[in-house]
Image (spheres, helix red, strand yellow):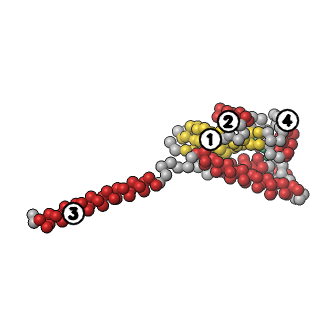
Amino acid sequence: MPKGIMRRTTTQYLMILVAGVMFVCTFMAAKRAVPQHGVLPTTVADYVHAVIEADRAIYTKHVVDRMQEKGVVGASENWESQNTLPLPAQFLIDSARMVAKKNRGIRYRLVSLWPIYERNGPATEFERGGLEAIMKQPDKTYTGYAESGGQRYFQAIYADIAVAQACIGCHNAHPNSPRRDFKLNDVMGGLVITFPVGP
Ligand code: HEC
């Protein structure tokens, strides 16, 4: 083989090698730039909680309280038959029902150790343990994992506080309520948020 061609071939090999190394380096750098983990489940639960709480607060303040103050219409439990507004708790429960219908696996519900309705009592050991924990430390979200139908779920319980006189006035007076001495700022129950996480 003539010397000129041989030199060119060696140079070409070198160039291909350098290009190859550069390609692999770029590829590896790009891969490192992509986050290896998604958003933490606790963060997702915080996002969902923020939205639910904002909707509930706006509905309570700008719809229920405002309409009541202006003498337009009040809120009551039998709102459908009485042509009134749904209670904020019912608004939340109804919206949770609609979310559940989307079959994405995300659910949320209001629970309490002293529920007006038994269906709102703790349904699992996790919920009972969580309610007891947030009674002691309302600022600390109680979290855990559960398994159902071969699917893993993340769960978080946030304290539901008696932020207004209306909360305790209504619950303490409700004929079904098993507890009648709620005070302002007491933990009345919790909001449980559940959603599926990877295998
Ligand atoms: C006018 C009455 C009324 C007011 C005001 C009210 N609630 Fe309720 N609450 C109810 C009723 C009725 C339910 C049950 C709804 C259902 O399951 O259909 C309920 C449900 C709940 C539950 C679920 C456990 C249970 O008792 O069944 C929690 C927790 C709760 N409310 C907290 C609050 C808080 C906190 C406030 C104030 C921000 C509040 N409630 C204001 C009537 C009221």
Q: Which residue is mark 4?
A: 181
Residue 7 position within the rendered picture, expressed as x and y whole percent measured from the top left: 16, 64
Q: Secondary structure at mark 1?
A: strand
Which amino acid, mark 3? Answer: Thr
Q: Quadrant of ligand 1?
A: top right
Alpha carbon distance from label 2 to label 3: 69 Å
Compare marks 4 and 3 and give the one earlier in the sequence. Answer: 3
Alpha carbon distance from label 1 to label 2: 10 Å
Q: Secondary structure at mark 4?
A: loop
Q: Quadrant of residue 61?
A: bottom right
Q: Secondary structure at mark 3?
A: helix
Which amino acid, mark 1? Answer: Gln
Which amino acid, mark 4? Answer: Asp
Q: Give the total of numbered labels.
A: 4
Which amino acid, mark 2? Answer: Gly
Residue 80 position within the rendered picture, expressed as x and y whole percent measured from the top left: 80, 51
Relative to 12, say whether 83 is above or below: above
Bin the neighbour count of mark 1 within 10 Å (Cα to Cα): few under 14, some 14-19, many 20 and up.
many
Q: Which mark is residue 130?
A: 2
Alpha carbon distance from label 4 to label 2: 21 Å
Residue at image point 71% right, 37% down? 137
Residue at image point 84% right, 57% down? 66
Residue 143 position within the rendered picture, expressed as x and y whole percent measured from the top left: 63, 39
Whether residue 88 sits left or right of residue 156 in the image: it is right
CB within 8 Å, label 2 to label 3: no
